[in-house]
Amino acid sequence: MGYMCNQVCEHCHVDAGPDRKEIMTRETMEQCLEVIRNTGAHTLDLTGGAPEMNPNFRWFVEEASKAGIQDFIVRSNLTIIRANKKYHDLPEFFKKHNVHVVSSMPHYTRGKTDKQRGDGVFDKSIEALQQLNAVGYGMPDSDLRLDLVYNPSGAFLPSDQAAMERDFKKALKEDFNIEFHNLFAITNLPISRFLDYLIASDNYEDYMYSLVEAYNPAAVENVMCTNTISVSWDGWLYDCDFNQMLGLKVASKVKHIKDYNEEVLNDRNIVISQHCYGCTAGAGSSCQGTVA
Amino acid sequence: MANSYYDPADLRKFGNITEWSEELGNKFFDYYGKVFEEGALSAREKSLIALAVAHVVKCPYCIDAYTKDGLQRGITKEEMMEAVHAGAAIESGATLVHGVQMMNKYNKLSM
């Protein structure tokens, strides 16, 4: 939905922030809706920046719902809900459209979260999670899905997703009475701001070594480029969000949403590079967490 | 040859010890892997124990490995430092408790 965000996170592969002006126009959204109607696409995964900051965000969700989308995912940074009065009702909006909320939460302690995502982010995130819980999100028997995303705050890979989930659930419940469904452990890919950090901190070689050493062929089958296509704010098509940031468009005659042709696109090879080791390390990594 | 006794890059070659003694090397790594699985103690708890022991035995490879392992498991720096202190307390206690032997000897030899 664009690169504009109310946060400037240390690890952000999008290099998002308040000064980024690139956001998806209504015209490009119309082109996406046309594709949804024609293809029967069932899942729409909205990310940014902060997708909610796009002035047409709510309109797009409503129209996509009419066009046949059954599973909405919004990658919410949580703090946006508390950032400004006009966003305070987002939990109710999400609930109305049965949006699956996936939120970043690097750690269940204030120190680690604020170090990665900025001062004050932890407290605002906690408030936002409590607000989401209050309307039913994340509760044990609720259909309103609330999942958290953990990504390491440094030059190391995520550990066992299930064990991390147990730790997060215990701490957030005990300390803040917060409930959520699943924790997705996502590996930081060596591109953009995180790559700059790896190089500046002299961790690049070790990190790449860790990724390559942890290569797991079983993770390849389910990485997200096998079932998802990434559409940039200006309508170009990519195999994944990371390729989008690297400017690696799909290897197909069809490169833009306005020319979308499923048959032509299905007959393409995924564009890969060294960052792809990030999605195939260990238990694998995708925007839905581990894949193997 | 390396110009120091410890090279961080050697940690990656740990598995190579099986090349000169395959059976014993494999038995060791099987045992090692099994020890750190979830059991009556969680893998997280075992990671902290390993970190404490790594300091007590002063193994730089192990300190690197289990600091990283702790980060991967979401273990905080406060937890890690408490574990190091637990190891250090036992190690210094082991020295100090010999003070009783010194006192015994002193008393026996003194009029």
Image (cartoon, coloured by chain):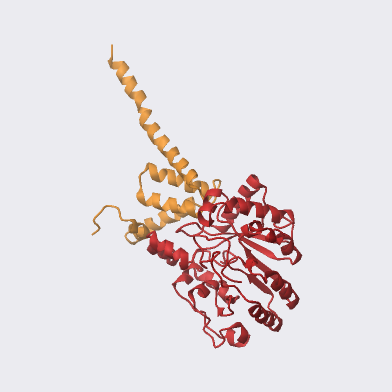
Chain colours: A red, B orange
- Look at the picture and state if A83 lies above or below A39: above
- Look at the picture and state if A79 lies above or below A229: above
Is A235 positioned to the left or the right of B63 in the image? right
- Look at the picture and state if A284 lies above or below A29: above
Image location (x, y in percent) of residue B35:
48, 50
Image location (x, y in percent) of residue B82:
47, 40
Work out whether residue B58 can be spotted. yes
Which image quadrant is residue A267 in? Answer: bottom right
Work out whether residue B21 can be spotted. no
- Look at the picture and state if B47 lies above or below A291: above
Which quarter of the rendered picture does the N terminus of chain A lie within? bottom right
Q: Nearer the viewer, residue B93 or A60?
A: A60
Q: Nearer the viewer, residue B91 or A2?
A: A2
Is A3 positioned to the left or the right of B12 in the image? right
Number of dots carrying numbers: 0
Residue occupying the point 53% across, 81% down = A250
Q: Nearer the viewer, residue A226 or A44?
A: A44
